[in-house]
Image (cartoon, rainbow, N blue to C red):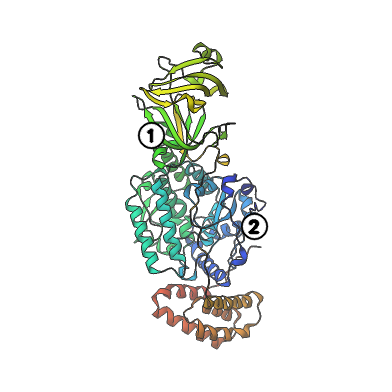
Amino acid sequence: MYNDFNNIHVAALPRHLKQYIVPQHYERYTAIDHAVWRYVMRQNYSYLKEVAYYPYIKGLERAGLSIEHIPDLQTMNDNLSEIGWGAVAVDGFIPPAIFMEFQEYKVLVIAADIRQLNHIEYTPTPDIIHESAGHAPIIADPDYNNYLSYFGSIGAKAMFSSKDYDLYEAIRDLSVLKELPNSSEEAIKKAEVQLDYCFKNLGEPSEMALLSRLHWWSVEYGLIGTLEQPKIYGAGLLSSIGESVSCMQPEVKKLWYNIDTANQAYDITKAQPQLFVTPNFQNLIKVLEEFADTMAFRRGGIEGIRKAIDSRNVATAVYSSGLQLSGVFTDVVETGNDEVGFIKTIGPSALSFENKQLPGHGKDYHKDGFSSPVGKLKNNEKSLEDFDEMAWRKIGVFVKNEVQLEFESGVEISGTVINLVRKNNKTLLISFENCRVTQNNELLFKPEWGVYDMAVGDKIISVFNGHADKDNYEIIVASNNDTPKIVYDKKTIDLQKIYQQIRDIRIQKNNYENLAHIWRELQQKHSDDWLAPLEILEILLHEKIQITLAQEIRTHLTHRAENENSFSKLITDGLTLIDAPEIKLVVH
């Protein structure tokens, strides 16, 4: 059930975005999940306070996050509302355009799932560590959160191609498979082959592909400051206890963030070989503005319509009159001077003005598409949208009069005028009955097809992704596949119970005598687990009890760190934290 968390930004979300919101289901988090959160947050606290750009700990507190437990969205919203943002839970991956729109409305999308213990350092799948501990803390910086929202407003308009969507699905499928504990090597290999195919056959990158790269190298993996001593602000780095350390090594090349950064592709499933540094957040906005000036929503024209056709998805073209045509564009007629002369959509289409659908011109009425000329009448220099009633009468355009119009593009329209639609002293639409539309003797519209609605506008001044009035035009953009939910086997459920016992002892500060029994059970039944022994050792040392048992566990962990490369750094970092001064960050 939808919940606005008493947050004005969440409550203000349009209907088409609210369909992506899912319950957090806080009760589904296991004790292992909370232990994973706690380990990552303790590591972040220890390390990121030195290398994060924004005071990381202060940011965590302002966002309503605790080291001790996974955050609940109500607490986060209570805190985020004070800095002008909100947060909602979504089901893992959502399409890039939708993600951008949430960002525009100053709402963080939080993937409610959390990474598995075997992917504790990094997961390519969105999870609550990345979304909340990565994005939320730095939002408290006003310059950054303004950039984030502005990026969302630009990104929501970006044109994307059908191949972009194939790539999005391939990345999503591989990421999910890598995170699920029981995925077969065969399934992962198949997904890797599909992803490689999509990368190699992407063709010319779309606006969304290029903009996603700018987003990745700033919002997700951005550094700020100097090339020699940068600080971390990207959420992907802030939430990865592996890459937040490795990214500072000289092997990872540091480059300046500029418009050319859009040419650098990335692989979400691998560590990044280079990162980009911005001297300040104002530079991010400068680069974004520079890129936005190349986009169809600012340029319009024949280039914009061609991008809409290539996308094979719903897009909106804006006439110079202000009329907005939304649909799947299939055809464009070009004039001799590289201007748009005629455009056509197929399937459900709609007409809007100032992002509000015109009465009677929704997708049900224009269910088979829409087509109309663009431009001036032949031998008439005045723009049609600027004609007033007297000017229209002069050329015979008034209700119940039969008229013939010839456009510079060669399109000819003959029929009886039945209606004119005007807004803000601009003519938007003229409707005809008994209408025939031709171009160079090609019949484009027949009288028996019914009423013909002719859009009015000298030029196409803007083209952008999606529908002008999204709440009146349902667009299916969600993935066909929900993120699979993990089904735990009996052994894992037994281990979760052990973690819960350890957690209860630490929080309640009693029953310490049970720790020895828990340790023996771990050795007998879960000898491959490394995090639970660390948690037991932490309790023993901090409470200064059972010194012999503590020495035994430390010896065991040290031996594993020395002999098991896959756990060496995780265990060593855990021991270092245990020996450090106690970390406290609890938000109530």
Front-most of residues 424 and 59: 424
Name the residue carrying label 2: 74
Q: Residues within 10 Å of mark 2 (few under 14, many from 20)?
A: some
**Which residue is located at x 47 percent, y 72 percent?**
573
The residue carrying pointer 1 sits among few (fewer than 14), some (14 to 19) or many (20 or more) residues within 10 Å by Cα, namely some
The x and y percentages for residue 417 are: 53, 19
Report, in whole angstroms, how far the alpha carbon at label 1 lies from the one at label 2.
Answer: 45 Å
Work out which quarter of the rendered image holds the C terminus and state it. Answer: bottom right
Q: Residue at x 43, y 65 (%)?
A: 178
Amino acid at circle 2: Gln
Above or below, 80 against 158 in this view is below
Q: Is residue 577 above or below residue 382?
A: below
Image location (x, y in percent) of residue 47? 49, 65
Left or right of 415? Residue 360 is right
Give the residue type that dot 1 points to.
Glu
Res 184 label: none
Q: Percent position (x, y) of residue 289?
A: 44, 39
- Residue 499 falls left or right of residue 241: right
Work out which residue is located at the far bottom of the displayed protein and give it: 548
- Where disc 1 sits, the SS reads helix
Please give the label number shown on residue 303: 1
SS type, badge 2: helix
Quarter of the rendering containing residue 110: bottom right
Q: Nearer the viewer, residue 180 or 214?
A: 180
